[in-house]
Amino acid sequence: MRYVIGIVRIFVGVLFVISGFIKLNDPVGFSFKLEEYFSQGVLDLPVFMPYALAISIFVVIVEVLLGIMLILGIKVKFTVWSLLGMIVFFTFLTFYSAYFNKVTDCGCFGDAIKLTPWESFTKDVVLLLLILLLFFGQKYITPLFRPFLTKIILIASFLFSVGYVYYVLNHLPVIDFRPYEIGKNIEDGMNVPEGAPKAIFEYAWKFNVNGEEKIIVTNGDYPAVDGEFIGVETEEIQKGYEPPVHDFTIEQEGEDYAKALLQEPKLVAIIAYDLRKTNESVFGEIKEVTDKAMQNGYKVIGMSASGPDQTKALTEQYKLNFDFYFTDETTLKTIVRSNPGVMVLEKGTIVQKVHYNDLDDLKFE
């Protein structure tokens, strides 16, 4: 039993550290996922939405530290109880998401590993069983190192976590797991490879045949039935391939200019997903940066999900020399974890991407 608990302890601890570190690398992304959970129609807890980022930072640091404490074998009762409480809550959350189809990706491993709601729930059930095993085998969890060394490791882990999250909040994630990382081509990301699996749908056709309701199931073809058609219900029984980049448009007055703009040899995109939440104080510097880019032959555009009244007011206030286009808010949040942020492209390939704190790092050649 001692060996079993030892293996489970290391496995669970490492899993919590990895899961926590991935979210620590992108706390803003995890906060967007929490906002989904808090929103109307999911958990109906909008009161917590303004605090989503603070909650995300707290949760991921605690997740990392609990994993390390389990591996080190310290404060065993507190650690195991905390892990049990956390996994019970997450198991409820993933079951709720899966059963009611509310949130399609739990965000357990950020953008590094995408899990469906049912896969997330299954993962949490397995973890729950393993943590219950640790709960009943607490006496076999003993410290790995001497108290002094253990304390040093724990303090260092805490300071590293706080310092790391502070850095990524004021710059960008160190590791970019999203399809818009530097070096990726957006058009290539939208392509569906040849032979990729297609979605399969099942259609349940309802007919009135001689006064009786009859249901005929097909994969799309209208059935040859001598009766009165009542209705049809559609169910997706197999998901098709979804390209990494989807829902990507750059619209203006209802027309999509994405294809043309992605052919530009020199394109600078100022991305501000919501101008009500953007850091307006940096748009003076944005003005200087974009003017310099234009002098060097770059085409400059703005991309936002805000309405034309807001973009016009901002443009006039800071005398910006570029037009704003509309792009889906979720897409913009995925592209860059900064509001505003800057992305530089060469024929659709991302060559630079910076937080508004790093505008000085931009190079226009």
Image (spheres, rainbow, N blue to C red):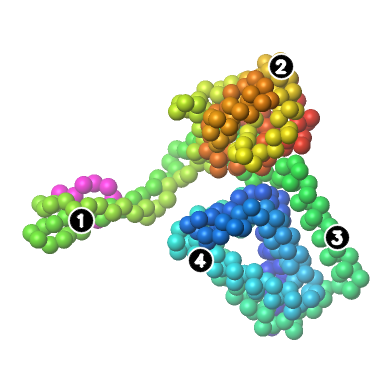
Q: CA distance from mark 2 to mark 1?
A: 64 Å
Is there any visible trace of residue 62 in the rendered image?
Answer: yes
Report the magenta stretch's main SS.
Answer: loop
Other residues around mark 1 within 10 Å, as few (<14) / some (14–19) / many (≥20): some
Mark 3 or 1 closer to N-term?
Answer: 3
Mark 2 or 3 closer to N-term?
Answer: 3
Q: Amino acid at mark 3?
A: Ala
Residue that extends furthest to the left in the rendered view of this protein? 210
- Per the rendered image, the range of residues in magenta is 216-224
**Please, is residue 139 above or below residue 248 in the view?**
below
Q: What is the quadrant of the N terminus in the image?
A: bottom right
Which residue lies under the disc numbered 4? 95
- Between 85 and 314, the residue placed more toward the observer is 314
Q: Position of residue 344 (x, y in %)?
A: 66, 28
Which residue lies under the disc numbered 1? 206
Q: Secondary structure at mark 4?
A: helix
Q: CA distance from mark 3 to mark 4?
A: 35 Å
Other residues around mark 2 within 10 Å, as few (<14) / some (14–19) / many (≥20): few
- Between 207 and 51, the residue placed more toward the observer is 51
Which residue lies under the disc numbered 2? 296
Q: Position of residue 347 (x, y in %)?
A: 59, 24
Q: Amino acid at mark 2?
A: Asn
Residue drawn at (45%, 28%), measured in percent from left and top?
254
Which residue lies under the disc numbered 3? 156
Q: Amino acid at mark 1?
A: Lys
Q: Secondary structure at mark 2?
A: loop
